[in-house]
Image: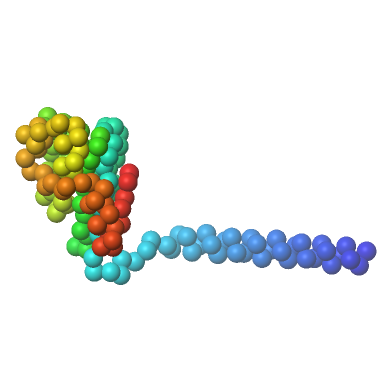
């Protein structure tokens, strides 16, 4: 009987402590506003290697969302590099022209892989004239990663 009482008391106290900790965590969560941007510069390169309209739109939306983050205002360097199927976003007449121009106006580097153009026999004249070019998309990702840039693949 004595041991049952001790066990019951232990269970009741454990439940109380667990409930109190959970309540404390809920309160802390309400006060949390995300990480603080302590660095002077944050660098991200977005990898666009898929021609799916949903992926292209998501990539552009993600970049715009990042640019709107108040913690990062004035601290961003962003590049969007397209290769493989992602080249479709840069074709003249695509639905993404204004959105891509909008990224450039906000300081985003918008680059196309020359290797993809050669492999797919795409002439630069088929793409928007406001693009930058890199020899290879993967090379750009590798160099940027080794320079401390974060690679984001939506």
Please tell me in which quadrant of the rendered image residue 7 appears: bottom right
Is residue 88 in sight in this rendering?
A: yes
Depicted 146 relative to depicted 125: above or below: below
Q: Residue 49, image x and y in percent?
A: 27, 39
Q: Residue 71, image x and y in percent?
A: 28, 62
Q: Residue furthest front?
A: 119
Q: Residue 75, image x and y in percent?
A: 22, 63
Please tell me in which quadrant of the rendered image residue 119 appears: top left
Image-based side of 118 in relation to 150, left or right: left
Image-based side of 124 in relation to 154, left or right: left
Depicted 57 relative to depicted 45: above or below: above
Residue at 37% x, 63% y: name it: 35
Q: Nearer the viewer, residue 72 or 148?
A: 148
Residue at 16% x, 47% y: name it: 135
Image-based side of 11 in relation to 143, left or right: right
Is residue 69 in sight in this rendering?
A: no
Render colour scheme = rainbow
Q: Residue 48, image x and y in percent?
A: 26, 42
Q: Nearer the viewer, residue 108 or 98?
A: 108
Depicted 27 relative to depicted 118: above or below: below
Query: What is the count of numbered marks?
Result: 0
Residue at 25% x, 62% y: name it: 147
Please tell me in which quadrant of the rendered image residue 148 appears: bottom left
The quadrant of the picture occupied by the N terminus is bottom right
Depicted 15 relative to depicted 125: above or below: below
Q: Residue furthest top?
A: 93
The quadrant of the picture occupied by the C terminus is top left
Residue at 47% x, 60% y: name it: 29
Q: Nearer the viewer, residue 31 or 113?
A: 113
């Amino acid at each position: 009987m004595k041991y049952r009482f001790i066990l019951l008391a232990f269970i009741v106290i454990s439940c109380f402590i667990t409930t109190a900790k959970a309540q404390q965590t809920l309160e802390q969560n309400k006060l949390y506003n995300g990480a603080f941007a302590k660095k002077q510069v944050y660098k991200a390169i977005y990898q666009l290697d898929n021609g799916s309209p949903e992926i292209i739109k998501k990539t552009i939306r993600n970049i715009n969302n990042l640019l709107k983050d108040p913690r990062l205002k004035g601290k961003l360097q962003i590049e969007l590099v397209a290769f493989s199927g992602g080249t479709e976003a840069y074709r003249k007449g695509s639905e993404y022209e204004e959105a891509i121009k909008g990224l450039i106006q906000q300081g985003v580097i918008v680059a196309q892989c020359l290797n993809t153009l050669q492999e797919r026999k795409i002439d630069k004249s088929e793409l928007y004239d406001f693009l930058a070019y890199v020899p290879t998309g993967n090379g750009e990702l590798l160099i940027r990663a080794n320079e401390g840039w974060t690679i984001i693949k939506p």
